[in-house]
Amino acid sequence: MTTPSTFAATLKQLPRVSHLAAIELIDGQETVIAVIENKSGQTGSLAVYNHLGQTFGAITVDAARKGLDLYCEHTDDARANPGKHPNIDRLLALAAAGSGMLRLRHKFAIDDPLADAPPPTT
């Protein structure tokens, strides 16, 4: 995939994430360090991290570098304003460290017709 020049254009090329409720990011100690939800203000990051996970198997140093390219103009804004874009800051830190990895755990958005059903009787 050729990286477009804007984040909006990038998002149009990434796989859809309507089936996801969230992605949990898990460090080497099996601790959930962040959750990216499928909600306004986070859906773009959900799409980027989902794509990186599908492509690289985890958020590796190489995945982080590719992710910074995918964020386009937002990467420069994150560098100029640390803390403004935590999902990009995480990729910047991983790329700068040159080592490390985060696993992804997908939380699926499903309509479960049995979720509110009463328990079965015996």
Image: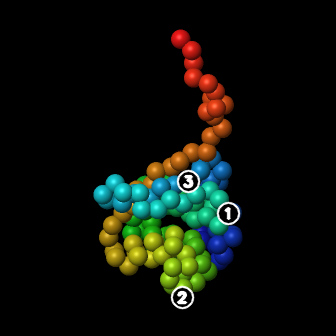
Residue that badge 1 annotates: 40
Identify whether 87 is placed above or below 119. Answer: below
Q: Which label's residue is closer to the chain start, 2 or 3?
A: 3
Proximity of marks 1 and 3: CB atoms separated by less than 8 Å:
no
Element under label 2? helix
Element under label 3? strand
Name the amino acid, label 2. Ala
Q: Which mark is residue 22?
A: 3
Q: Which mark is residue 8?
A: none
The answer to whether 86 appears left or right of 61 in the picture is right
Along the viewing direction, whichever of 101 and 114 lies nearer the viewer: 114
Colour scheme in the image? rainbow
Name the amino acid, label 3. Ala
Tell me the quarter of the image containing the N terminus. bottom right
How far separated are the C-alphas under marks 1 and 2?
23 Å
Q: Quadrant of residue 120?
A: top right
x then y, percent, for residue 34: 47, 62
Along the viewing direction, whichever of 105 and 118 lies nearer the viewer: 118
How far separated are the C-alphas under marks 1 and 3?
12 Å
How far separated are the C-alphas under marks 2 and 3?
27 Å
x then y, percent, for residue 24: 47, 55
- Inspect this view and state whether residue 51 appears: no
Proximity of marks 1 and 2: CB atoms separated by less than 8 Å:
no
The residue sitting at 54% across, 88% down in the picture is 80
- Inspect this view and state whether residue 16 appears: yes
Element under label 1? loop
Q: Residue furthest bottom?
A: 80
Residue that badge 2 annotates: 80
Q: Which label's residue is closer to the chain start, 1 or 2?
A: 1
